[in-house]
Amino acid sequence: MLLSYTQSTLPWPLEVSTAAGSAGKIFFAVAGTPDVLCKTIVISVPVGELDGEVYSATPIPTISINTANWSPSAPQITPGDDLGYKSGVSYAVFTLTNQVAGFVVTDPFKVTISGNVNTVTGEAGVELKELSSPVLQPAYLVRAGSFTFSKAFPVFYARNFIAASPGTPTIPATEFANGAGFMLAWESNGAYFELYQKAISRPIYQGIATTYTITGGIATDSTFILVANWGEETLCESITITVSNPDITPKTIVASGNASVGGTLSVTGNTTLSKATIADTNINGALSVNGTANLQTTNIGTNTVNANLAVNGSITANQLTVSGNTTLKDVTINGSIKMGDWVISLDPGSGPEKGNLCFLNTHTNGYAVILNNGGFECGGGLSVAGTYGYINNHSIVTEP
């Protein structure tokens, strides 16, 4: 024959039937051969209950092809005497016709023949005939070949335990996104299956199917164990699935490089930050800063800062105590500031002091007012540079 054929079966070898019919598949993989022309391929499969026959005659075997380039005929049960094969043996005959213009065979394809294997072990031959010709020297001839398949008693097996996305079940995968569904599949002639998942003591699946879908996916890496049962025998297979973006609950995290949080970061214990830049943050608990912190648009409630605090943006603080040096730039004060016995206030009232910086002595209840063209410095006591004054009968009395 001019074309190249590769034979295989599922299972391998074919398993003879017991009480119930045992399904078996024969495969022919045909290679693409640009230098060969082929009009037809005829496949003859012996059917019956003898050792040299593959399938039982009932139900009649079926055929499928994984390409539209070739079209198969319905099976024709034909005596071997009429075909030039074994006398007294019937054959299920399938004719494949090439639908490609010029009868070229440039693309590979696969032929699958399915049926119930008969009950007798042995060797059975499947016959092929092709009507083919070389491209360079066109001369169509019938070229024949024979392929032998073995039949044996069933041997318990469980194999090819894989995971795949539901949309691509034939492409194995071992990693999926958090929460993404995936399917588990396996090959086995077992009668009953159990599927276990790491950290779950009971089976997540029990039944006779050879596939199972994890519809909700998983949040962390997990191992799945398949237990196949056949009478008193069991076989186990396992597979580990990883998650590309898992949920994690580590005891300790040490990051030598940058760490980024795209969502919400919730911290319930103590947190130590060295040279941290924090933007648009609400802090509702206690915040202790022992190094340098740059805070931008930050709301802080009941906090203690034990080192330098540099604020380059806006800060809203409730009961903020600063024991170290504090540098504030472009500060807007809507309330008051207390220093010892003095309360510093802007716009303390509606009188003539409004719009000026005023100092209220908490012991004397008297105002000292710094007018707009002045300034002040605060050292060991209160000293004022510039024009200042005090309140007298609702008027500001200025002094040089």
Image (cartoon, rainbow, N blue to C red):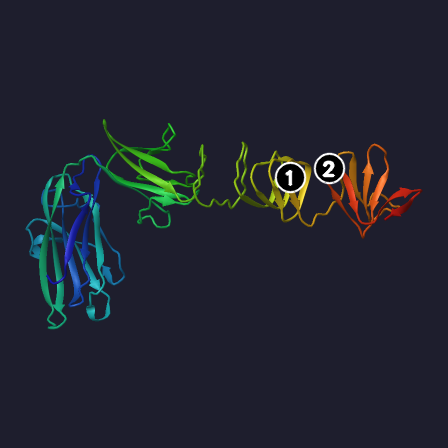
| For residue 396, side relative to residue 126 (left or right) | right
Q: Amino acid at mark 2?
A: Gly
Q: In the figure, is residue 188 to the left or right of 259?
A: left
Element marked by disc 2: loop
Q: Residue furthest bottom?
A: 137
Q: Is residue 239 left or right of residue 143?
A: right
Locate residue 128, reporting x and y percent.
12, 57
Q: Which residue is mark 1?
A: 300
Q: For this rendering, which residue is in front, 345 or 380?
A: 380
Specify few, some or many for label 1: CA neighbours under 10 Å numbering under 14, 14-19, or 20 or more.
many
Amino acid at the residue labelled 1: Ile
- What residue is rendered at 20% in x and 34% in y? 156
Secondary structure beneath dot 1 equals strand
Where is residue 252 drawn, in percent x and y? Answer: 45, 34
Q: How far apart are the alpha carbons under marks 1 and 2? A: 29 Å
The answer to which of 94 and 41 lies nearer the viewer is 41
Residue 197 image point, x, y percent:
36, 33
Q: What's the mark number on residue 219?
A: none
* Crowd tier of the residue under label 2, counting other residues whose Cα lies within 10 Å: few below 14, some 14–19, many 20 or above: few
**Mark nearer the N terminus (1 vs 2):** 1
Say which mark, if any, is on residue 380.
2
Q: Position of residue 398 (x, y in %)?
A: 88, 47
Residue 392 in which image quadrant: top right
Cβ–Cβ below 8 Å for labels 1 and 2?
no
The residue under the point 39% across, 30% down is 200
- Asked if residue 193 can be seen in this view, the reply is yes
Task: Choose mark 1 or mark 2, whichever is in front.
Answer: 2
| Residue 223 quadrant | top left
Foreground of the two, 208 or 348: 348
